[in-house]
Image: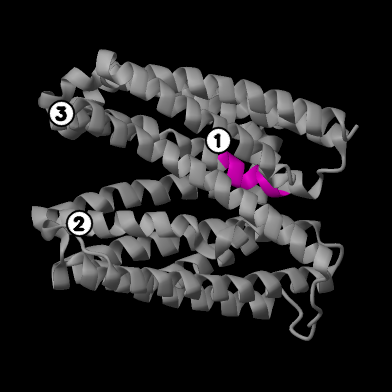
Amino acid sequence: MFDIIKQKISKLYSTGAFHITIGTFITKFVAFFGSVFVVRLLTKDDYGMLSYVENIYSYALIFAALGLSNALLRFLIIAKNEKERKSYFDYIIKNSVIRNVIIMLIMIIVSYLVRFPENYAKAKEWIPVVALLLPFQDLVNDDLFTLRAFFKNKLYAYASFIISTTLIVGRIVGAMLDGVGGVLWSRVIINFICGSLGYCYITKKLFIPEYKDKLNISEVKAVNMYSLQYMITNGFWALFMLNDTFLIGMLLNDPSALADYKVAYVLPGNISIFANAIGIFVAPYFTKNEKDTSWVRRNFRKVFISNALIVGGITLLVIILGEFLISFMYGEQYLNIVPLMQVLLVAAFINSGLRYSTANLLSSMGEVKYNMYVSAGGVILQIIADIIFIPQFGTYAVAIANCVIYLLMAIALYIIFNKRVLTNRG
């Protein structure tokens, strides 16, 4: 028994599973504590300005290359040969740059035309800076997705950690040297350097340079349709995350209640780190073997159960230690949020432990449109439930509604996965 466990651990280590899991966790951990330093280095007004500008950029980032980065992780894997793989890569990179430059120019033009609130008037000079970030940050994502598509799991984990750590150090140094401008310019410069170096490495080491074929019309259509559906799905999830805080602020008009919810959501929001790490590792394998129904059925159960147990165990541990963690991180003045955080942790388990695996594998196997449909339905239900129940039950209405909606989404996706993947492909 011990030898079997040892063999499985050794296999996971050799394939890079541990590197991705630990690397993802450490990357998020560094980013979390790095942001604390930036808050301390900037004045409250400057940090408010930075948050305002970066929030606007986050909306633009949803539309980056109209989702083409996600297509790399699918089409580089299902390509029939090296020549076709290079054709997909060239098309996606070229069109990503063109689309991102257009989005960047739109951001810059709009920033000069829009009248910002008086307290955020300086955003007019900072949005053009952060707009420059879009093509370079998307290029970094292209590089990382390409490494995943080539199953370079260890290299992906190392690269992700180095890039994230460099960005955090850059933000801290930028904040010390030049406040908001230093933080924003550091992101632009570091993403430019990392994206360019990654692209040079990939084109020289992973592809045969002389392959110069173009995709045919049907292949281009498939890439763009998949990318667009993925972008829309991610857009719905961005709205899902933003709607809660927006509606709490609007319907309750109570800053302290909103602050309580934001703090209560921090730990539940980070539960997804573990599900994401598992998803990052397994998705390319499911793409590669998507036509082998018996393999998919067998390994889906392993992934689903393993993810649920890992996320569930961590969720339970945080629930047990909730009072201590809140007191340690934020002080006793926030102990009142512990019950709210516990409900949000249940919602986080349903979302990351039960829904995520199925949604992630559906996307990796080319069925992203079903994620889009289910996400759209979830957003509609969320808005309706929040509008009806927040005025009566406050922030607890959001937490309970999320539990119910995530569960409905998890069930819907499981049924779709069983019907579209495990049955129809059998």
Nearer-N-terminus badge (3/2) = 2
Dot 2 crowding, Cα within 10 Å, few <14, some 14–19, many 20+: many
Q: CA distance from mark 1 to mark 3?
A: 28 Å
In the picture of the structure, the residue carrying the numbered disc 2 is 38
Nearer-N-terminus badge (2/1) = 2
- Residue in the picture at 80% in, 35% down: 296
Q: Amino acid at mark 2?
A: Val
User: Callout 3: helix, strand or loop?
Assistant: loop
Q: Quadrant of residue 293?
A: top right
Part of the protein shown in magenta: 278-284
Dot 1 crowding, Cα within 10 Å, few <14, some 14–19, many 20+: some
Dot 3 crowding, Cα within 10 Å, few <14, some 14–19, many 20+: few
User: Callout 2: helix, strand or loop?
Assistant: helix
Q: Position of residue 35 (x, y in %)?
A: 25, 52
Residue 376's disc number: 1
Q: Amino acid at mark 3?
A: Asp
Left or right placement of residue 194 versus residue 56 in this view: right
Q: Nearer the viewer, residue 420 or 191?
A: 420
- Residue in the picture at 58% in, 58% down: 67
Q: Are marks 2 and 1 in contact (CB under 8 Å)?
A: no
In the picture of the structure, the residue carrying the numbered disc 3 is 254
Q: Amino acid at mark 1?
A: Ala
Q: Position of residue 180 (x, y in %)?
A: 19, 66
Which quadrant would the C terminus be assigned to in this image? Answer: top right
Q: Are marks 1 and 3 in contact (CB under 8 Å)?
A: no
Mark 3 vs mark 2: give the one in front.
3
